[in-house]
Image: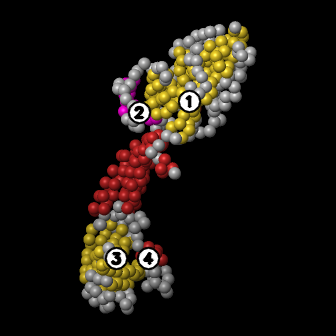
Amino acid sequence: MTDAFQPKDARVAAINCTACGSPLPALAGHRARAMVCSYCGAVMDRHAEYALLARYRDMPRPDGPFRIGLSGEILGVMQTIVGIVAIRAQIEGAGYGWTNYQLYSPTHGYSWLTWSDGHLTHSRKTRDMPESGGHFAYKAPLNAAGRAFRMYEHYVARITYLEGELTWIPSLGDTTEVIEAVDPPYGYAVVIGETETEFEFTSYLDRAQTMAAFGVEDTFPRALGVHGTQPFIAGSFHTALSKAGKWFAPIALTLGLVFAAIGAGQKITETLIVDTDRGGSIVFPLNRPDRLAEVRLSANVYNAWSWYDMELTNEETDETVAEFDGGIEYYEGYDSDGKWTEGSQTVTFRFKPPEAGAYRLTITTGDPQSARLPVRVEIRENVMLSRYLFGLGIFFALCALSLWFRRARFEAKRWGDDEEEDD
Amino acid sequence: MTRIVFVIFSLATGAATYAGVAGLGGEDKQIATSIRSGSGGRVGYIGGVK
């Protein structure tokens, strides 16, 4: 029955289809029960002289990067693709499809490589049964194989395509009830058939690594969405950003608080100018030209505004250093929302003195319409700003939290919690 | 990578601390302009001489 079959990959044994005579590679071990012809869809019994059992013509070939005969290493074991089974399922009203590749290893037996929306997983049968039985409940715990899985999906899988050597005698349209649970990067499935229930353990695979192992060039579209078993893997830069942010956010925010507490500087002097029409002045020393000095005006302005012209002169040279003006305005009242206020009874002006020395600040009312009220003038030196440290602290905190947000978004996609958002 | 980011964040924290102490960007624009003009900002005064 067998003869020499020479595909491109390697010299392997082959049989001829008992229905159409086409040469078919015989790659699987003896336990494989069925051989499905790649050309005519004939299903043959490998354990009964390749007797013809059924024939499915014009089966739609499923999407996927692999073909029968390719070999590669998966999870440290050399595997050969010996069969292909395409599955369709309705999950919460939506149709999904994926391609299962039957794998054979002379040392490890049979398992599955699954291509689903560009994701790759490896599944093998396991004898580890769930610690407790029961029905499917979304996100409910399912402990098995020493892991704490959470139930993910419940569906009925239907076979839509068959090819190659398979471990059972399949029929097109066969259905199986499946309960899937996940604990990324692993999954666990309870496969409930008509006569028996089987359990499968799944591992999420690195797509690039797996395709390279099988010598397949990855020209396929990017993986869609987040697979149930896909682990969240942050890039090294993002991880470093988050780690550094956790350290530096509290440092920057603490420094910002210290600056806010002591940044008001030292009061040099203060005075009260009663008659601002006549004007008044205040003389003060400024010893730190590299630091901010501050003029703070306060007046008991109420539902009014006042405007001041100011002149800063060097007391020793009598040279005008700066001229500036500014006002105080404060309003308050009541409306339907209650009390409201607007403005402030204090205004500050900050500057850097051109050099250390004595200065005089002269203040007069700057507008005929201005309110005439006594104004308190306060001069401060060595004023510091906390805004940069607070800004940086917020940035660092966002860096630290970004990884958490990204992980949360990833998990939301995994569990379909973001569907509303995507709509 | 972590070491590089830690160095960058250290430099940024140092720069923000220096900027806060030195009061960079904290000057009142009108006063700063007036001081920079060298004449007290008054029209008619040239060269900073009153």
Spatial CA span between label 2 and label 4: 71 Å
Residue A282 locus on image (x, y percent): 29, 81
Q: Which residue is mark 2?
A: A136
Which residue has dot 4 on it? B30
Q: Which residue is mark 3?
A: A343
What's the CA distance linking mark 1 and mark 4? 77 Å
Q: Could you tell me if the residues under marks 1 and 3 are in contact, i.e. CB atoms within 8 Å?
A: no
Q: Residue at x 41, y 37 (%)?
A: A138
Q: Kindly state the secondary structure of the residue where label 2 is placed.
A: loop
Amino acid on which disc 2 is placed? Phe
Q: Quadrant of the N terminus of chain A?
A: top right
Tell me the residue that label 1 is attached to.
Answer: A158
Query: Of helix, strand and loop, which one carries label 1?
Result: strand
Residue contact between numbered discs 4 and 3, judged by CB atoms under 8 Å: no
Labels 1 and 3 positioned on one and the same chain: yes
Nearest the viewer among A141 and A191 is A191
The mark closer to the camera, 1 or 3, is: 1
What amino acid is at disc 4?
Gln
Q: Earlier in the sequence, mark 1 or mark 2?
A: 2
The residue nearer to you, when weighing A98 against A297, is A98
C-alpha distance separating marks 1 and 2: 19 Å
Tell which circle, 1 or 3, labels the residue nearer the N-terminal end: 1
- Rendered position, A391 above or below A151: below
Q: Earlier in the sequence, mark 2 or mark 3?
A: 2
Q: Amino acid at mark 1?
A: Arg
- Colouring of the image: secondary structure
Q: Which residues are magenta?
A: A141-153
